[in-house]
Amino acid sequence: MSTDTTAANEPSFEAARDELTDVVRRLEAGGTTLEESLTLWERGEELAAICQRWLDAARTRLDAARGIAPEDSAANE
């Protein structure tokens, strides 16, 4: 993602991925209350969306570098 479209406090892809991994680990381990589990799940959803935005932006940059129009990119997925 470019810095002009990134929220100032949004983590990097790697940081979001690492935190998401930790959230999944904690949910799989169990031992949390229902409320804690829901909070972890919600955070996981946020982190997954952040990672997806980074991946989408990376795809756009790669397609641009390869000279592929955005509508052609969707056909290649």
Image (spheres, helix red, strand yellow):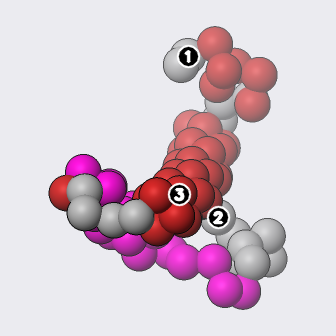
Q: Using the image, tell me which numbered label, if any, was put on residue 1.
A: 2
- Mark 2 or mark 3, which has the lower sequence index? 2
In this figure, which residue is indicated by the disc labeled 1? 76
Which residue position is annotated with label 3?
Answer: 38
The residues colored magenta run: 8-28
x and y, in percent, of residue 25 in the image:
24, 59
Specify few, some or many for label 2: CA neighbours under 10 Å numbering under 14, 14-19, or 20 or more. Answer: some
Q: Earlier in the sequence, mark 3 or mark 1?
A: 3
Q: Residue at x 53, y 57 (%)?
A: 38
Question: What type of secondary structure mainly makes up the magenta span?
Answer: helix
**C-alpha span from label 2 to label 3:** 28 Å
> Which of labels 3 and 1 is toward the front?
3
Q: Quadrant of residue 67?
A: top right
Viewer-closest of 41 and 46: 41
Q: Give the image quarter of residue 2.
A: bottom right
- Mark 2 or 3, closer to the camera: 3
Query: Is residue 1 shown left or right of residue 23?
Result: right
Is 39 drawn above or below residue 52 in the view shown? below
Q: Amino acid at mark 3?
A: Leu
